[in-house]
Image (spheres, helix red, strand yellow):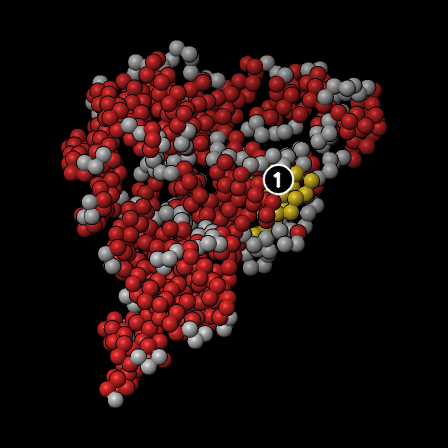
Amino acid sequence: MPDSARHEWVIAPFRADRDAAFRNLAGTWHHINAHRNLRGSYTGAIEVVRRLLNYPPAVLDHVITAHQLTLLLICPELANQGFASAEVLKWLTYSMEGNSPSRTLRLAHGLTDFLLDYAAQQSLSRLCISFENVDFADPLDQEFLAVLLRRSDPNQLLIRVCTSSDRLDGPLRSALRTFASTKHLEPFVPAEMAAIPEAWRIWLRRCATGWAGEWAGLSDLSKYFDLSAMQPESSSLQELFEDVVTDIPLVERCALGNEYVRSDCTSDSLVIKNAYSAIPVEQRWVLHRARRQELEGLNEYSLSLGAIPLHSELEGTDPAPLLAASKHYMHVAFYDATLEWALRGRRMLPAEDRGQAYTEFSRNILFALMLLGRLDEVDAICAENLALSDDPALLAHTTYAKAILSARLYQPSRRDYEAAGNWIRQSLAFTERVQPSETRAVNIAFLRNTTALVEMRTGHLATAHELLCEALRYMSAEAPNKYQAESAILLHNRARLHVQRKQLSQAIEDLTTLLQHQPGNSEAYFDRGVLHQRLGLHEQASRDYAAAIKWSPPYAEAYFNRARALVSLGEVDQAILDYTRALDLVPGHIEALIDRARLFHARNNFEAARTDVHTALLLAPTNARLLCLLGLLELENGNLVQAYESLTKSIEAEPSLPDAWANRATVLYKQGALDQARLDLSRALSLREDPAAFYNRGRCFEAQKRWTEAADDYSRALKLTRGDVRYILRRLAWCQKAASS
């Protein structure tokens, strides 16, 4: 792809260099600081949303409504701006703790959809967004940018990613390498720095390669010192700034330090950063306290997830904002941020403080690590808690975690259901020592749920069912105010148990009850759709998948499953759109590529079918169904040799695939190999009785003048065929007449 049609990755060691390079750039750009210090997770996304929503609401109403779930999850203060419905606001109150960490990928796609829809409104010019400090962005922002780079057309939505180095990991680095042109910027030299002696320039380039962009910092120093009179030495640039800022008057130093604080500690100016470090610690506390109070006065909730707890931490007196941020992130299932604020908040507590805040921080650390799959660290923390804590609440959480590890999360060879049962009993004993409350009652109900899990894993399905019923009754009686919100997991698990017991109707009943309590539960709609589909109730399945799509940021499985239901209902055009949407979200979705290719083939759109097949074969070169489809396409083009080769490879890859045998029989028939064609059709029919295969074998018998056998196959095809059967009746009559003459 030419650079003119690519996004941009701009690398320079200091922001001053990056800003200067684009100072006179043509076009209208939105410049977004993605540094996580500002608003925590999704800082960059939040800033984009806030910026774009400042435009006239009439232009955006339908775009906002279409993406309100995503927008509210990443930018919670939008809930106060009146565009969310009451049912959506209620949906936000339900905890998402326990969801897979990979669920944030849905938000990345939801944000991308919002920006693409917004960009489509820009009829006169493309939308241009520059994200700064991306190497200091939260992992969720980086995940979002990776998706945005892949899915957006630079001619409509141009993205610039700015970093201080090329040290990025994972999907974002890969996306930048694939979809962006890389620009390494030379240091910018302001005009006022022209008087710097050549000796300084040589020294900077020799001892500070890669850092010589801090000309603006030297310019700041020139306010206080005559650089032309200073002799450069062999020390590093950083050491130079550390040395000289201590000679700046304290008042000036505090003013520079305050600039760093007011940047929410995001400035990379060496002068400002070193001035901040060189002022007395008590003065730094004062600056952080003033900044925190200023930010709190803005009443923007997302600041309480980034800059406000940051300044509280650096002020060093109040861990409550860090605990609140950690709790919020656990509620929305952003586990990395949950863990980070919990660890930082707990470090603020005095060593001897093992009170409620310590317990709550420790609980979030424990479960965030568990949900992130960092099980060795969970083991270590559990051992520490069991050895050092006497808090029944923390010990109840710890023993519950050990039960889940033993029953479900360890590798199968390490699971121990007897140990899990022992941990559950210990957790119950600790829970019963906690002061009575509805929260305690919910925890007791969930321990019964965990016991049911152990019974399910050991094959005692009836016992597991009774435990789940008992847990629901207990929660309803002892925690009525929490029942609606907290019963969903128990009902969902009982539905899964019903499925395991092949009681699909009862499973549907439980999911329906769950949805009466939580009408915005996308996973419950999806699972009920799967059950309806298994029962052949495709209309109901399609409606459930539509509801699953409505109540979640986008995910491919819902569109893929709805596409299959729509095919069963004969709504092929809509099914193709859903398969296409699934492939937008997951380009390597093999099943979606296969299914869409089959629909294209059925519509005689052979070129589109071939494109999908070749795309999928790059990902799965031995997939039997893909090879079978490729054989069909070669057959359509009259390439019998290539068709035979592809179909033979399909059979070798999956001998139980009847379509491959039946289609190869067609090739053999066209080549005149009637006996071999009949053998392939017989093999296909041994795997699946199919009217087309019976009809085609009848044609083989007829070509060999074996009239009775041909008539028999036509009769069997007639019984299985739905729709027009006149062509079968004609051949049957002909063979019967030939057999009797």
User: Which secondary structure, mark 1?
Assistant: strand
13, 410: nearer the viewer: 410
Q: Where is residue 289 in the image (x, y as percent from the top left)?
A: 50, 21
- Relative to 452, is 349 above or below? above
Specify few, some or many for label 1: CA neighbours under 10 Å numbering under 14, 14-19, or 20 or more. many
Quarter of the picture holding the C terminus: bottom left
Q: Quadrant of residue 268?
A: top right
- Image point (61%, 18%), residue name: 277
In the displayed structure, would residue 5 be above or below residue 375? below
Q: In which quarter of the image is residue 725?
A: bottom left
Disc 1 residue type? Cys
Q: Which residue is drawn at 48% across and 63% down?
A: 645
The reply to whether residue 741 is visible in this rendering is yes
Whether residue 297 is visible to the viewer of this picture, yes or no, is no
Q: Residue at x 21, y 37 (%)?
A: 459
Considering every residue shown, the one lying at the far bottom of the view is 741
Relative to 692, is 639 on the left or the right?
right
Front-lying residue, 201 or 463: 463
Between 730 and 16, the one nearer to me in the picture: 730
Percent coordinates x, y for residue 539 in the rendering: 27, 60
Which residue does the numbered mark 1 point to in the structure image?
162
Count all numbered tags in the image, as a single digit.
1
Q: Residue at x 38, y 36 (%)?
A: 333
**Where 298 falls versus 505 (above or below)?**
above
- Farthest residue to the top: give it: 352
